[in-house]
Image (tube, helix red, strand yellow):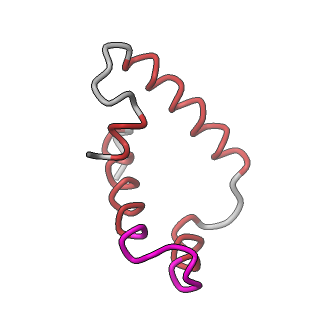
């Protein structure tokens, strides 16, 4: 199952509220995050903190989120 889909409620009828919560959490994260996200995730992969599979999943989720937000 798609992790982004699960985070948004996994088809729950209350999904619009979950999207609102997801957006709020993202805004909070964005305000506190420092640095380049691509560089950070690459460093995590290089250091062994995450696996190649987890890296690939994070990249895919970022692409899906960008599409959802209308970003390129």
Determine which quarter of the picture holds residue 63. Answer: bottom left
The one of 51 and 29 positioned closer to us in this rendering: 51
The one of 20 and 54 positioned closer to us in this rendering: 54
Return the x and y of residue 57 as percentages of the image width and height: 36, 62
Residue drawn at 38 percent across, 39 percent down? 69
Which residues are the magenta region?
A: 45-55
Q: Quadrant of the N terminus?
A: top left
Whether residue 32 sits left or right of residue 57 in the image: it is right
Whether residue 17 sits left or right of residue 57 in the image: it is right
Taking 36 as reference, is 20 above or below it? above
Residue drawn at 40 percent across, 31 percent down? 8
Return the x and y of residue 59 as percentages of the image width and height: 38, 63
On whether residue 59 falls in the magenta region, the answer is no
Return the x and y of residue 10 as percentages of the image width and height: 32, 30
Return the x and y of residue 31 as percentages of the image width and height: 70, 44
Q: What is the number of callouts on the image?
A: 0
The one of 63 and 50 positioned closer to us in this rendering: 50
Q: Main secondary structure of the magenta part?
A: helix
């Amino acid at each position: 199952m798609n992790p982004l889909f699960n985070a948004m409620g996994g088809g729950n009828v209350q999904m619009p509220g979950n999207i609102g919560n997801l957006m709020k959490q993202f805004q909070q994260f964005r305000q506190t995050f420092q640095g380049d996200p691509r560089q950070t995730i690459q460093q995590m992969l290089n250091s062994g903190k995450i696996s190649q599979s987890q890296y690939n999943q994070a990249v895919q989720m970022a692409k899906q989120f960008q599409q959802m937000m209308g970003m390129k």
